[in-house]
Every structure is written in C-alpha cells, then in structure tokens.
Image (cartoon, rainbow, N blue to C red):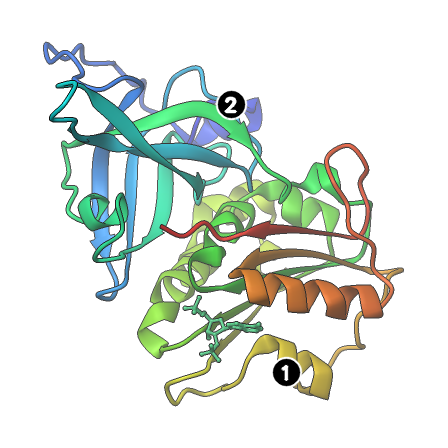
C-alpha cells in the first residue's frame, strides 16, 4: 500500500523520497489520471487503481465522478466525457485512488471501462462529495457498515481509515452478494488489513481485532446465507455475533447498496430508533446508493 504524506503521522511509512518523473506524454483527456493496476474478480466485478490528482483532498467514504471520453458525435464531430459517480475505495491517506466497479455488458460506461489496462487514462473530476463520512455521525460505541455488491467500495475506504478505529470500539461490516465469488474483493481487503503491519503500527497493534466481518450470499451456497435484512429481522445476525440488537444509544450505521436494500435497511434502523444524519446535521446513521451503470 502506498501512503500519502498528509497527515504527518503517516510520513513515517514513506522512507524513500519520491522523485516525480516528468512524462513527455501530454494527457489526451481533461482531468486525466493514469491507471496503475486492474484486477478482475468475476465476469461482473473488477477493481482498479489510478494516480491521484496532487491537489485532491477528500474524506474517506466520499465519491467522485469518473469516466472516459464518449464516442465522437457524427453530427458535430465532437466528443463528450461519459461520467458516473464512483465511491472512492481507497482511504484519504493513500497516494493513489482505488475504485470497485460492476461490469454491465451494455452499460454506456462500464462496457468500456472494464477493458482499461495499466497505462490507460481515465477522467477523474476532483470534486469529492458524499454522506458516508464520519462527520455525518454523532459519537457512538459500535459502527455498522451494511453493504451489498459494489456498495462495499466506500467501506473499503473507511475500513482503512484510522478514525474508524479511534471513534469506535467495534466495527461490524456486513456484505451481502448473490454469489461467493462476489465476496472476494471485500474478503481480500479484510485479510490485507488484518495482516498489514504498517497499519498496525499506525493504528495500534490490536486495531484489527475491532473488525467483525459478516459476509452472506443469497443465490449460492456459502457458510452464511440470506439477505442481511432478513437476518436482522430474525435476530440471527445478533445471535451469530453474540451481541445485543441495534440500540440508538450505542450503534451508528452506514448503508450502501442497491436502492431496495437501502430503503429496507433504513426502515429497520428507524424501527430500532436510529435517526438519519447528514453532513449538516450529524445523527445515528447515513445512507448512500451504490452507483450502477
Ligand atoms: P437477492 O439475491 O435475494 O436479490 P444485486 O446484485 O442485485 O445488486 O444484489 C446484491 C445483493 O443484495 C443480493 O444478494 C440481493 O439478494 C441483495 N438484495 C437485493 N435487494 C435487497 C433488499 N431489498 N434487501 C436486502 N438485500 C437485498
């Protein structure tokens, strides 16, 4: 993992001075960033990393608009950028940007984006926004990250954010996908966090013991099956984790998944007495749609 020099406490991880090589290549795109890594997980999912604009500051959990140049309009001969909102999956301190994406074969953007390779350029508009940020929650003891599918992305950022462990005693991430292979990105990330010695050095030896990871599948056999919403209703989730049910005094939550899931979970949290927060009015939970093509 590469670290950004800011905040200062992270400087210790970058011992070698970085010399910037001036590329002779002039970027062909506005707000161009260069792809540095691409990983494919299933025929529906992939992740990639790219360079980070030197002036871009964001809060872990926020999203930006990214994309590619669209086709040439035969009438005007002009090209327009084709942009979509993507949660930033990397934490605020990372030197690079990471994104986790669905592949939609006839999707205007992802049908093309899924073919990017290292060295290619993408467009990244440096205007981060979003509600899945610590600032939108009031203090609590336990934080829940509820995700389906690519809704895991903002939590990949927040799970690598030191503030998450400073602010809470327990961090519970649930991830529901149709099939087992769709859990790989999240599973690998949790594994890498648990084994990352530098993160342990920065956040304290035992920080990762605060993470409880609860993956479930709905359409393929796995160790835990079922929609998280059903597992909450039945109480099975709390029994499995051996914890008390949701409580507005101690629990805080962030939701990111498909629209129906977000709405159902919102209702469950409201029933438990939690109130929705925002940047302008922090409260007990926040919600954001996983952006699909
Ligand atoms: P299911 O297979 O029962 O539809 P998708 O890939 O369609 O975005 O779905 C991702 C995961 O979210 C799937 O496991 C899906 O379960 C689950 N899901 C879809 N809608 C809801 C909902 N309203 N509440 C809880 N989980 C949902």
Residue 49, placed above or below residue 253: above
Q: Residue furthest front?
A: 75
Kind of element beneath mark 1: helix
Residue 133, placed above or below residue 265: above
Q: Quadrant of the N terminus?
A: top left
Number of numbered discs on residues = 2
Give left or right: position of 251 versus 202.
right
In the picture, the disc for residue 57 is: 2
Residue positioned 56% across, 24% down in the render: 7
Residue positioned 18% across, 13% down in the render: 21
Q: Circle 1: is it few (<14), some (14-19), or many (20+) Cα within 10 Å?
A: few
The mark that comes first in sequence, 2 or 1, is: 2
**Residue 237 can be seen in this image:** no
Residue 1, placed above or below residue 287: above
In the picture, the disc for residue 230 is: 1
Q: Circle 2: is it few (<14), some (14-19), or many (20+) Cα within 10 Å?
A: some
Name the quadrant containing residue 182.
bottom left
Kind of element beneath mark 2: loop
| Nearest-to-viewer mark from 2 and 1 | 1
Residue positioned 79% across, 76% down in the render: 245
Residue 70, placed above or below residue 167: above
In the picture, the disc for residue 126 is: none
Q: Nearer the viewer, residue 167 or 136?
A: 136
Q: Does the numbered disc 1 mark a residue whose Cβ is under 8 Å from ligand 1?
A: yes
Name the quadrant containing residue 2.
top left
How far from the left and from the top, in percent, is residue 8? Answer: 55, 22
Q: Are marks 2 and 1 in contact (CB under 8 Å)?
A: no
How far from the left and from the top, in percent, is residue 6? Answer: 51, 22
How far from the left and from the top, in percent, is residue 202? Answer: 55, 40
């Amino acid at each position: 993992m590469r670290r950004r020099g800011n905040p200062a406490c992270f400087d210790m991880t970058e011992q070698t001075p970085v010399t910037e090589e001036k590329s002779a290549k002039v970027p062909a795109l506005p707000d161009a960033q260069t792809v540095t890594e691409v990983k494919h997980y299933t025929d529906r999912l992939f992740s990639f990393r790219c360079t980070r604009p030197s002036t871009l500051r964001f809060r872990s959990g926020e999203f930006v608009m990214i994309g590619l140049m669209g086709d040439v309009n035969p009438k005007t001969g002009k090209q327009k950028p084709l942009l979509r909102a993507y949660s930033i999956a990397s934490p605020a301190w990372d030197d690079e940007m990471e994104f986790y994406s669905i592949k939609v074969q006839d999707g205007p953007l992802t049908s093309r984006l899924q073919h990017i390779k290292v060295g290619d350029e993408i467009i990244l508009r440096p205007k981060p926004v979003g509600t899945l940020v610590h600032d939108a929650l009031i203090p609590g003891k336990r934080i829940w990250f509820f995700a389906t599918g690519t809704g895991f992305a903002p939590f990949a950022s927040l799970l690598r954010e030191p503030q998450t462990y400073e602010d809470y005693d327990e961090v519970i991430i649930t991830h529901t996908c149709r099939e087992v292979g769709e859990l790989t990105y999240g599973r690998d990330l949790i594994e890498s966090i648990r084994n990352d010695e530098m993160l342990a050095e920065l956040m304290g030896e035992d920080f990762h013991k605060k993470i409880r990871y609860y993956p479930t599948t709905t359409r393929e056999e796995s160790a835990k099956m079922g929609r998280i919403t059903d597992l909450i209703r039945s109480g099975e989730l709390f029994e499995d984790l051996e914890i008390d049910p949701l409580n507005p005094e101690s629990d805080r939550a962030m939701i990111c998944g498909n629209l129906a899931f977000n709405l159902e979970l919102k209702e469950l949290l409201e029933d438990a007495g939690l109130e929705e927060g925002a940047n302008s009015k922090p409260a007990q939970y926040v919600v954001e749609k996983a952006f699909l093509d």
